[in-house]
Image (tube, grey):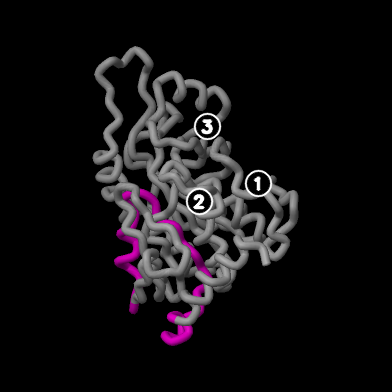
Amino acid sequence: MDPRLEKINQAAAYVKEILDNEGLAPKIGIVLGSGLGRLSDDIENPVTIPYKNIPGFPVSTAIGHKGNFIVGSLAGKTVIAMQGRLHYYEGYDMDMVVLPIRVMKVLGIEYLFVSNAAGGVNMSFQTGDLMIITDHINQIPNPLIGPNLDEFGPRFPDMTRPYDPRLIAMAEEIGKEMGLNLRKGVYFACTGPTYETPHEYKYMRVVGADAVGMSTTPEVIVARHADIPVFGMSVITDVAHDPEDTDYVTDGEEIVRQADAAATKMIALFKGLIGRL
């Protein structure tokens, strides 16, 4: 057996045994980005499974990432939420970064919701904006490089619509009902861990990006490889600045604070969308 598949199945078996004992079968997976873990507080009758307890599982080291699976009821549906994700910049290889998504696939999820804290590349964006991700530009190593895991999907998966148009349309409708001023745009994923230089921001804007971050796209690629529909949202936690602005500094702690401040709106939108699935 492919050692990657063995690791996936071992981790999934550990989680499934816990969930079976609780009578839980999650159908929706959620990835909570920096400062956005508060959504897990809204999950009813939660079962917490620390990553560190799962065989062969990596642990989160990034600011604002607690490192747990939280399983329970949200908007009337059984969900499994990642309270903290894994990043390439933490030193993990790509198979480890996307291991949780493949484990959730084995557990039976039918939809994946991803969120992140992102820098606003689009000059019209403001701190605290919510951006529905419509497409992405991936500059993180592709997690499908290497022998294909045929059990999950094809060698060359289609990425024409990485973010599900039906879910996007539903989110826009719900946003209007809630009175939210939702943005839509393209997410640019880079490796980090450095924040972007002013001219890197300019470059990203030129090639069509609206927001930038250090995550999300590997998870989305693996989900689409496994034919899981994806909905993605960025919380804009800092905004593009002019290269001549010599006083500007990107502050990681402030980014987490801004994400937390905007989390209430994102949580309400996620719950509204999940409730309609």
Give the image quarter of residue 170: bottom right
Q: What stretch is highlighted in magenta?
A: 18-45
For the residues labelled 2 and 1, the Cα–Cα distance comes to 23 Å
Q: Which of marks 2 and 1 is nearer the N terminus?
A: 1
**Picture layout, residue 249 above or below residue 224:** above
Camera-side residue of 149 and 126: 149
Membership of 263 in magenta stretch: no
Q: Is residue 129 left or right of residue 15?
A: left
- Judge the density around disc 3: few (<14), some (14-19), many (≥20) Cα neighbours within 10 Å: many
Q: In this view, does 1 lie to the left or right of 192?
A: right
For the residues labelled 3 and 1, the Cα–Cα distance comes to 24 Å
Camera-side residue of 53 and 138: 53
- Asked if residue 29 shows in the view, the reply is yes
The residue identified by callout 2 is 232
Q: In this view, does 259 lie to the left or right of 162?
A: left
Q: Which amino acid does label 3 sit on?
A: Ala
Q: Helix or strand or loop: what does disc 3 sit on?
A: loop
Give the image quarter of residue 31: bottom left
**Picture layout, residue 157 above or below residue 68:** above
Q: Which label sits on residue 209? A: 3
Q: Which of marks 3 and 2 is nearer the N terminus?
A: 3
Q: In this view, does 83 lie to the left or right of 183?
A: left
Q: Where is residue 175 in the image (x, y as percent from the top left)?
A: 44, 53
Q: Which of marks 3 and 1 is nearer the N terminus?
A: 1
Q: Do the residues labelled 3 and 1 touch (CB within 8 Å)?
A: no
At a point 56% along the width and 29% down the height, the residue shown is 208
Q: Are marks 2 and 1 in contact (CB under 8 Å)?
A: no
Camera-side residue of 147 and 277: 147
The residue identified by callout 1 is 145
Q: Which amino acid does label 1 sit on?
A: Ile
